[in-house]
């Protein structure tokens, strides 16, 4: 098997497990977990925010770990952390241990992306790197898509589901240890932090608000349809599959930016995200629109992560890794803040108000995209959106 196929297959599985299962599947099973452990919307938001907080911490140390220990070791560690976190979720007897386990599981996502990027650069021929990275990046949506049918097949047994996910993560750890190269990241160049001028602050604001808005469905999508429509597990699983399936289409972000421009794609897909949040959460929208809203959300979210990759590389063309880290870190910080806020609004004001507020947050995020016109535009952007798996 060629290095591109080997690394692509392992990376696809690793990203699917860490992002699709360890991080985002919690939202799918939240109604069942809430029923068993009595979390309530506010506590559920805090617990869910822990997953995004884990990402924030892990992404700050993953690049350094990759430089020191190599891609194979850190990717293996990411799979092990995902497995430990999901095993903890499966066994959690109370909300406190559940919160700790969710944080650990979420940390695996921050650990996973830098070593995979290093492995591709080190071992895959340059003309195959874009295709390999595209394959790896698709893992997030695939993991989300398959978690829905798994939830349906296990008939509400969330502990059994997370136990199975943990076993899969440990299997990926073995695969990473056997098949990934012992590649280290590029040597770090000493330097100061980038200048936080108006253009950088606009990127920070846009990514923070987009991350916050996305938690309406990443953390509470299943709970929204359960409360609003009294749907059973089968329909909640269908919503999750729709989100994942829609996300696969988001791999076209680079081509859309090349054709229509960053500002138009950014503004349009934030409007789509706002519409999708409202469609799933608001009682004013027909129930039949919920699944369509989930699919739109998946496509919008993955497209927007591609937009922010392109934007951040344009902003710091001489330090692309720094730009990517800032953009994706702020997405996760926004998600960390957004989940508890949405949970509180849901508990205090109901789904109509909570969905309207978070749809509004997505619209506001779109107002910060105009500053990209001050940035360099000479870099090719067609495939940048596929180079790193986003949060």
Image (cartoon, rainbow, N blue to C red):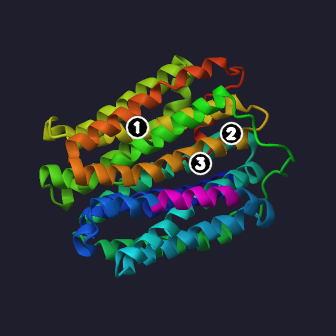
| Disc 2 to disc 1: CB gap under 8 Å | no
* 58 in the magenta segment: yes
Q: For this view, does 202 lie left or right of residue 34?
A: right
Where, by quadrant of the figure, is residue 32 drawn?
Answer: bottom left
Q: Quadrant of the N terminus?
A: bottom right
Kindly tell me whether residue 264 is visible in this rendering: yes
Write down the residue under mark 2. Answer: 323
Q: Residue at x 49, y 35 (%)?
A: 304
- Vertical order, 27 against 292 (above or below): below
First reached walking from the N terminus: tag 3 or tag 2: 2
Q: CA distance from mark 3 to mark 1?
A: 21 Å
Q: Residue at x 42, y 24 (%)?
A: 268
x and y percent of residue 303 in the render?
48, 35
Write down the residue under mark 1. Answer: 299
Q: CA distance from mark 2 to mark 1?
A: 23 Å
| Disc 3 to disc 1: CB gap under 8 Å | no
x and y percent of residue 255 in the render?
54, 26
Kindly tell me whether residue 163 is visible in this rendering: no
């Amino acid at each position: 098997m060629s290095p591109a196929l080997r690394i692509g297959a392992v990376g696809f599985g690793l990203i699917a497990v860490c992002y699709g299962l360890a991080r985002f599947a919690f939202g799918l099973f939240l109604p069942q977990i809430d029923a068993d452990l009595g979390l309530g919307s506010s506590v559920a938001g805090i617990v869910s925010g822990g997953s995004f907080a884990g990402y924030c911490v892990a992404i700050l140390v993953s690049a350094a770990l990759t430089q020191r220990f190599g891609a194979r070791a850190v990717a293996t560690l990411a799979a092990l952390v995902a497995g430990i976190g999901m095993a903890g979720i499966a066994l959690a007897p109370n909300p406190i241990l559940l919160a700790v386990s969710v944080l650990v599981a979420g940390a695996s996502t921050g650990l996973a992306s830098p070593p995979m990027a290093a492995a591709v650069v080190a071992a895959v021929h340059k003309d195959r790197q874009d295709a390999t990275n595209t394959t790896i990046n698709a893992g997030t949506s695939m993991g989300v898509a398959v978690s829905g049918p798994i939830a349906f097949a296990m008939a509400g047994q969330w502990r059994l589901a997370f136990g199975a996910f943990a076993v899969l993560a440990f299997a990926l750890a073995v695969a990473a240890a056997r098949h990934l190269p012992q590649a280290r990241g590029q040597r770090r160049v000493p330097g100061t932090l980038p200048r936080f001028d108006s253009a950088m602050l606009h990127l920070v604001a846009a990514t923070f608000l987009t991350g916050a808005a996305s938690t309406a469905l990443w953390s509470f999508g299943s709970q929204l349809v359960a409360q609003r429509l009294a749907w059973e597990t089968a329909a909640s699983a269908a919503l999750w599959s729709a989100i994942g399936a829609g996300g696969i289409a988001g791999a076209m972000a680079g081509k859309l930016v090349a054709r229509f421009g960053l500002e138009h794609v950014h503004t349009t897909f934030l409007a789509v995200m706002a519409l999708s949040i409202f469609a799933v959460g608001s009682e004013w929208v027909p129930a039949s629109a919920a699944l369509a809203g989930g699919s739109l959300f998946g496509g919008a979210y993955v497209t927007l992560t591609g937009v922010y990759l392109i934007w951040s590389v344009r902003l710091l063309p001489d330090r692309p890794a720094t730009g990517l880290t800032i953009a994706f870190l702020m997405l996760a910080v926004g998600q960390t803040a957004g989940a508890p806020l949405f949970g509180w609004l849901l508990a205090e004001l109901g789904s109509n108000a909570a969905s309207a507020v978070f749809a509004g947050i997505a619209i506001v995020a779109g107002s910060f995209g105009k500053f990209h016109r001050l940035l360099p535009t000479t870099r090719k952007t067609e495939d940048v959106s596929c180079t790193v798996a986003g949060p």
